[in-house]
Amino acid sequence: MEVDVAIVGAGFTGLWTAYYLARAEPGLRIAVCEAESAGFGASGRNGGWCSALFPASLTSLESLSDRASALAHHRAMRASVDEVGRVLAEESIDAHFTRGGTISLIRGPAQLARARAEVAAARSWGCAEDELQLLDAGAAVEMLAGSSVHGATYTPDCAAIHPLRLVRGLADSVERLGVRLFEHTPVLAIGPGRLSTPSGVVRADTVVRATEGYTADLPGERRRLVPIYSLVIATEPLGPDLWARIGLRRRETFTDFRHLLVYGQRTADDRIVFGGRGAPYHFGSGIRTAYDRDERVFRRLREALVELLPMLADTTVTHAWGGCLGVPRDWCASVGLDRGTGVAWAGGYVGDGVSTTNLAGRTLRDLVLGRESDLVRLPWVDHRSPRWEPEPLRWIGVNAGLRAMAAADVEERLTGRPSRIAGLVSPLVG
């Protein structure tokens, strides 16, 4: 088969890229090959945050370019949240998009120090209170009645979504635009002008790798991105009396300032979806269906949720799942096109991909079509992250880092002071 653009992976990155290319050039021949079904990976399994978060800091982005470019990237991420909402409305995709923002609870003196430093850093970049606000304890509890709350930060730049509804709706939209979507068609190898599948070779002027956490399964890509598992639980629907006690009246997404990340949202049907890191990295960048579930991590997530919101002690967890996300060695997502080979890529979102993939899709559109837009001048374009260390160093380092961050949270709860452990290992685990 011959096409103009062949895309590997029908998650958010691949589908957004196909969508914007088909909108821009209706006659373009586009094929998307997916090993499973559209949204099978992180795109359909995440915690439903469509946020302006980017895995690399503004300081890191500045080091790739300059201050003005870093700020342009920040503005582009904020705009991407609105762009996702715009497309959902235009395409009549009911993904339960509600822009309630994000509250990050401060639950101890050490967390308070980090929150103040984060707000001070934001102010140094010109971010005003309408982007990031420091709340006192009373205002924080009014928004989310967590335990041991000392305050919170709040940003409006996040929408809660139903990720699988979004990705399946996007798949339907691209097919209506004439994109050929081949599900259950694994790609065995990617090369200049071609990709190989069990059914034959697809030839294309441009090949786009949009495989994120599954990149490690491609030949020669084992050390490109580390697949890290993030696991999620969901409660039964909660009644109005319980929600009156909890808060989240605008469907704010929520987290706190612990080191080992947790994330949550109130769903449109009044459940709490709550996830976090803590599952081990598997030797050799291993990816298995069995890794999607870890009962010990599920138990810890429920314990963490009840510790955060004690009123949920008698609430039943009805669903639990997991999946892998892609982590580059320098924690900086990237997008690019090698014009010599015609191979393009995007990924390395470290779990911040729901909106970042949208920005990637629009950027790949402009790169593939040769457009000189503001998007193709952002600092993550054509960035090349270093490769991860070979095994067993990769296994030792990543898992030691994850354990150390969990230990840092325990240390801070006991001492009330910022953890020294966290300062040493945070460059490794983001």
Image (spheres, rainbow, N blue to C red):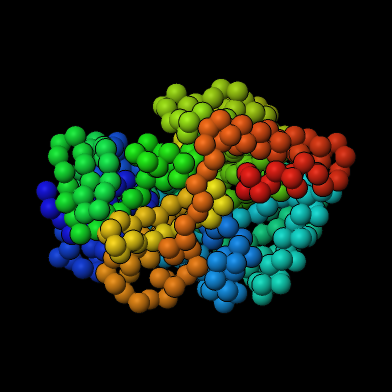
Instruction: Using the image, determine if residue 62 lies above or below residue 159.
Output: below
Q: Quadrant of residue 406?
A: top right
**Horizontal and vertical percent position of residue 236:** 53, 32
110 or 4, which lies in front? 4
Q: Is residue 166 left or right of residue 401?
A: left
Residue at (42% x, 76% y) in the render: 374
Instruction: Using the image, determine if residue 352 lies above or below residue 272.
Output: below
**Horizontal and vertical percent position of residue 318:** 51, 28
Q: Is residue 418 left or right of residue 280?
A: right
Asked if residue 18 shows in the view, the reply is: no
| Tally of numbered discs | 0
242 or 136, which lies in front? 136
Instruction: Using the image, determine if residue 109 lies above or below residue 53.
Output: above
Instruction: Using the image, determine if residue 177 lies above or below residue 79.
Output: above
Residue at (48% x, 31% y) in the render: 284
Residue at (50% x, 40% y) in the render: 226
Residue at (58% x, 44% y) in the render: 264
**Horizontal and vertical percent position of residue 63:** 60, 67
Residue closest to the far left: 1
Q: Is residue 238 left or right of residue 172?
A: right
Asked if residue 189 shows in the view, the reply is: yes
**Horizontal and vertical percent position of residue 218:** 35, 39
